[in-house]
Image (cartoon, grey):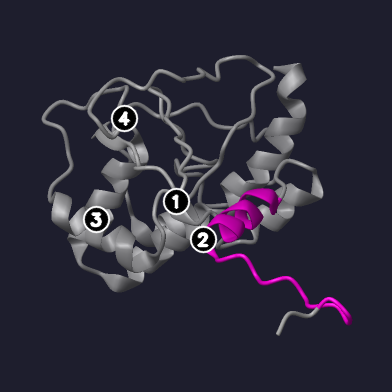
Amino acid sequence: REEAGWWDKIFGKIYLRRQGAMQKLKLKLPGAAAAGPCLDELKKPAGGVVETFVGLSSYETGKMVVRLDRHLPPPIPADKHYYLANNGEILKDVYQASQTTDAVILHYPNASNFNWRKKYEEMGDFRPAEYDPQASRVPVASSAVVRRGSRRDQDVFFRTFIMQNEYNELAYLAEYGLVTRVETVRNILYYYDNPEEPQEQLPGLMTW
């Protein structure tokens, strides 16, 4: 645990800052309590601490990322975590990023507050009959908040636990070098999504 002291200090502060949002929501998280940061060295609120989400959510089953090219047919989603080639065959060129040196892609699971609400409204009651410990707790909690119908609660939950930035968490983590903005992907997508600009006609080389 001594090796994780830095993690406890950084994420413990986020854990405590999010107490206000969790108390407003009065949301009981499903399943067994997840392991959170050690708060022994931090000042805790007088009213006690309630369990809350502390970091970015992840999937035990992993996620599959495919490269798109506007000149080629896109792959076909096979299920929530896999794709097939456009002709229905299994993808042949696949790399499984399971090494400790492989990059980790962080993404927002929903593009906007509206799409987040719409997703869980369409999914209905997301609660499993018997809670699966392997299931992600964020979708279960999201479903519960959306089903309440309170826009105030939905906005608080979305900003705090989906966008992860209600309390400037991303700027706080960036101060410690734990998150960084990657511009390369956006620039590549812009290049492929926009037509190539015509080259400037230089004097003496202009065509008429």
Q: Position of residue 63 (x, y in %)?
A: 42, 30
The tag earlier along the polypeptide, 2 or 1, is: 1
Between the residue at mark 1 and the residue at mark 4, the CA separation in whole angstroms equals 15 Å
> Quadrant of the image for the N terminus?
top right
Q: Position of residue 156 (x, y in %)?
A: 42, 64
Residue at x 30% of width, y 46% of height: 141
Residue 119, disc:
3
The tag earlier along the polypeptide, 1 or 3, is: 1
Is residue 167 rendered to the left or right of residue 203?
A: left
Disc 2 residue type?
Asp
| Relative vertical location of residue 55 with respect to residue 186 in this rendering, above or below | above
The tag earlier along the polypeptide, 3 or 2, is: 3
Please tell me whether mark 3 or mark 2 is closer to you in this view: 2
Disc 4 residue type?
Ala
Q: Which residue is mark 4?
A: 85
Rate crowding at label 2 as few (under 14), some (14 to 19) or many (20 or more) other CA atoms within 10 Å: few
Dot 1 falls on a residue whose secondary structure is loop
Q: Which residue is mark 1?
A: 70
Determine contact: label 3, label 2, CB under 8 Å.
no
Is residue 199 rendered to the left or right of residue 22?
A: right
Residue at x 34% of width, y 42% of height: 73
The tag earlier along the polypeptide, 3 or 4, is: 4
Please tell me whether mark 1 or mark 3 is closer to you in this view: 1
Dot 4 falls on a residue whose secondary structure is loop
Between the residue at mark 4 and the residue at mark 2, the CA separation in whole angstroms equals 21 Å
- Asked whether residue 16 is drawn in magenta, I would say no
Dot 3 falls on a residue whose secondary structure is helix
User: Which segment did they paint magenta?
Assistant: 181-205
Determine contact: label 2, label 1, CB under 8 Å.
yes
Q: Position of residue 27 (x, y in %)?
A: 32, 50
Q: Which residue is mark 2?
A: 193
Between the residue at mark 3 and the residue at mark 2, the CA separation in whole angstroms equals 27 Å
